[in-house]
Amino acid sequence: MDERVTRTQAALLSTLLDAIIFNCNQKTKARRNIDPQGITNLLWAMAKLVDRGQELTPELKEAVAVLLSRVNTNKDQFGAQGIANLLWATAKLVNNWEWTPQLKEAVPALLPQVNAQKANFDPQEIVSLLWAMAKLVSNGQERTPELKEALAALLPHVNAQKEQFNAQGIANLLWAMAKLLDNGELAPKLKETVATLLPQVKPLKNHFNPQEIVNLLWAMAKLVNNGQERTPELKESLTLLLHQVNAKKNQFSPQGIANLFWAMAKLADTGLEQTPAFKKAVAALVPLVSGQKTRFNPQESANLLWAMAKLLDSGQARTPGLNQAVAALMSLVNIQKAHFTPQEIANLLWAMAKLVDNGQKQTQELKKAVAALLPHMNAKKDQFSAQGIANLLWAMGKLVDSGQQWVPELITAVATMLPYVKAKIDQFIPQHIANLLWVMAKLLDIGQEQTPGLKKAVAVLLPCVQAKKTNLRPRVSPTCCGPWRNWWTTGRNGHQGSKRPWLCYCTSCTHRKTNLVPRALPTCSGPWRNWWRTGMSRPVGSQKRWLPCYPK
């Protein structure tokens, strides 16, 4: 845009903001020229400007503040459309700014009006309201009785008007349901509303734009992760959307690609079947990662690497394209190392360890990425959550166990994190406790000194085993339909240094019905027959007899 035009627009905006501030600060009501409709329109416009990148200048902040201060005094005079637009505007302002005192006052003033006007909202306003509430909650809005009443008042109207929502409305509603359910609000009613909305995806499948496809798949992954029933309608909706991913693969933004990978990894992690449509969608997106690698921000890089590790752990084939994408992301980690949050550092190191655990070679890119992250982990040591600490220590134990050199930086990182085990002891779930004790044992096994820090960590963890023994899950051995199923179908070697038990056949699945024998030894006619025919070597650590036994 021409510089003169930019300067002119800035001058006009400044003049308008000064006029708004002047009018709102008039002492007598008769001299104020801005009515309730004007307050709504101005706040909506300012929220829209800020959402599109308008700088939050002191004049703009002051104008927003004086308008918000009048929302409370005029709360009974806003119509249904005004209430919807005002809550949408406050959600946008919070998302792009902060919880100012005026916003904290305006939102509670508006929420009771939703219940009072519930019968007057049209479909678009219902969508805007639920989207706004979800966005407010995700940005720290307290779950007050007024918020819960407003939600409860709107949900029946979603069900009643389900066929009147357009494609954007359906996408925004399901996104809002997922966000609200993720924060624990009105779970049974929300799940019922989701079940009502899912059949509307099919008739509108060709009308969703790329961003809406991303939001829908993200929402469904979140919903399934939070206990939404995997109904035929949900599975059909997923299949339809995955076909759209393949058809519109070149239209997704870098953020969209990252969110799609996250959603598919989360769906695979929750046990959803990797259908042909699922595999085609992954195959269509993988080349885009390498092609757009310079456009991913640190959060997107971390999410992508985490997602690829999850997909491989859930049985995704390790294709050359996937290997290339992983290598491209590893190089990004080194470049963006100073910009990762504590959670992203934990996710990245967990992902690298999981990739190695699933056969990833310890390339120079991987070693450089690990070395780049360790100093930042030490610098942010007091900012990790309980889950982050458990994941970090598990990752370091797994990396060293898989051949990562036991370098001074790694020793320092382990020593740095051990004291935080005691500090967060009340926040660990049973899975964290099991993983942490495994790490302690593994570290000692590979030469870690029994330092006071390690002894204290073990000492605080052991009582937790006794206290939470009823919640610890028994470990499931690998089976012919588990995540290690590729070993016998592809004849792949076991992992270097693996001490896991070898495959046992399921007695409840349909795989290889002729071989349904617990822990059957490999034979010349069984599914492991290629091992002796191709002369593959025994995996390191295997205690099983390796040469085949011939059937009698």
Image (cartoon, rainbow, N blue to C red):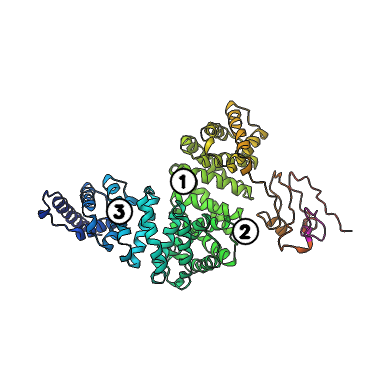
Tell me the chief SS of the magenta region.
loop
Indicate which label's residue lies in the foreground, 1 or 3: 3
**Which stretch did the figure color magenta?**
515-529
Q: Which three-letter amino acid code belongs to the residue tagged 1?
A: Ile
Which of the two discs, 2 and 1, labels the residue nearer the N terminus? 2
Residue to which mark 2 is pinned: 317
Mark 3 secondary-structure assignment: helix
Residue to which mark 1 is pinned: 335
x and y percent of residue 328 in the render?
A: 52, 52
State whether residue 411 is above or below residue 342: above
Indicate which label's residue lies in the foreground, 2 or 1: 2
Left of 492 or right of it: where is 12? Answer: left
Q: Dividing the image into 4 quarters, which one contains the N terminus? A: bottom left
Q: Nearer the viewer, residue 1 or 509?
A: 509
The answer to whether mark 1 and mark 3 are in CB contact below 8 A is no
Residue 520 included in the magenta stretch of the image = yes
Which of the two discs, 1 and 3, labels the residue nearer the N terminus? 3
Q: Which three-letter amino acid code belongs to the residue tagged 2?
A: Ala
